[in-house]
Image (tube, helix red, strand yellow):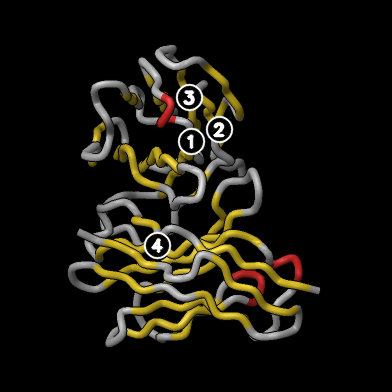
Amino acid sequence: AQSVAQPEDQVNVAEGNPLTVKCTYSVSGNPYLFWYVQYPNRGLQFLLKYITGDNLVKGSYGFEAEFNKSQTSFHLKKPSALVSDSALYFCAVRDNTGRRALTFGSGTRLQVQP
Amino acid sequence: EAGVAQSPRYKIIEKRQSVAFWCNPISGHATLYWYQQILGQGPKLLIQFQNNGVVDDSQLPKDRFSAERLKGVDSTLKIQPAKLEDSAVYLCASSVSGTDNTGELFFGEGSRLTVL
């Protein structure tokens, strides 16, 4: 079975400060890892993914994520937060057969204060 | 490129009634997914189609939920009879292929169901 844990229901950060949203995963074999963002009354939008290669992955809107195999983590980061980054963030995993659907975490609400 | 289309966006029904949701995936995407997102939770997979065949429906409550993708393009998800706990957003997603798929899923805006 594959699973994702997002230990923080909410993360608060001041605009201009760096942000981190945490994610740990469990999967058989090598993981494919994803981050999605969800704005109110909207579907999920893809931010970035890790498949293989460099452990630091860069994605949309200045976000990046660091894959750490030993800690089974895939934390989302941004050097300088914007108020417009306030949204719900989901980490997701699938195994490397590619045939299974994504399993999502419970989500972390990011609140960026002006 | 057109995205994943879903309808209706909102639906309110009484318990024990039936409801159907429709999804049209991105053109050329072989794999289609239905997820259920209950308020405050992450999306949970209900069913995955590869073309018009079912790949995974292990979490679909088959006594009340059904889904089809007859021509391998658009799909319908039905609930009959609905229960209060079915109140959720039903998200449809598609991806290029289910085999050796490293690609991301593209989501529609969802259909919000309220069961009274």
Q: Do the residues labelled 1 and 2 touch (CB within 8 Å)?
A: yes
Looking at the image, residue A12 sits to the left or right of residue B75; the answer is right
- Circles 4 and 1, Cβ within 8 Å, touching? The answer is no
As drawn, B71 above or below A108: above
Residue located beneath label 2 in the image? B112
Earlier in the chain: of badge 3 and badge 1, it is 3
Residue A81 percent location from the top left of the image: 70, 78
Question: Which residue sits at x=61%, y=30%?
Answer: B9
Q: Do the residues labelled 3 and 1 touch (CB within 8 Å)?
A: no
Which label belongs to residue B88? 1
Q: Name the residue under label 3.
A: B21
Residue found 64% across the figure and 43% down from its top: A41
Q: How many labels does the image show?
A: 4
The residue lying toward the viewer, choosing from A32 and A87, is A87
Tag shown at residue A92: 4
Amino acid type assigned to the residue bearing label 3 in the image: Phe
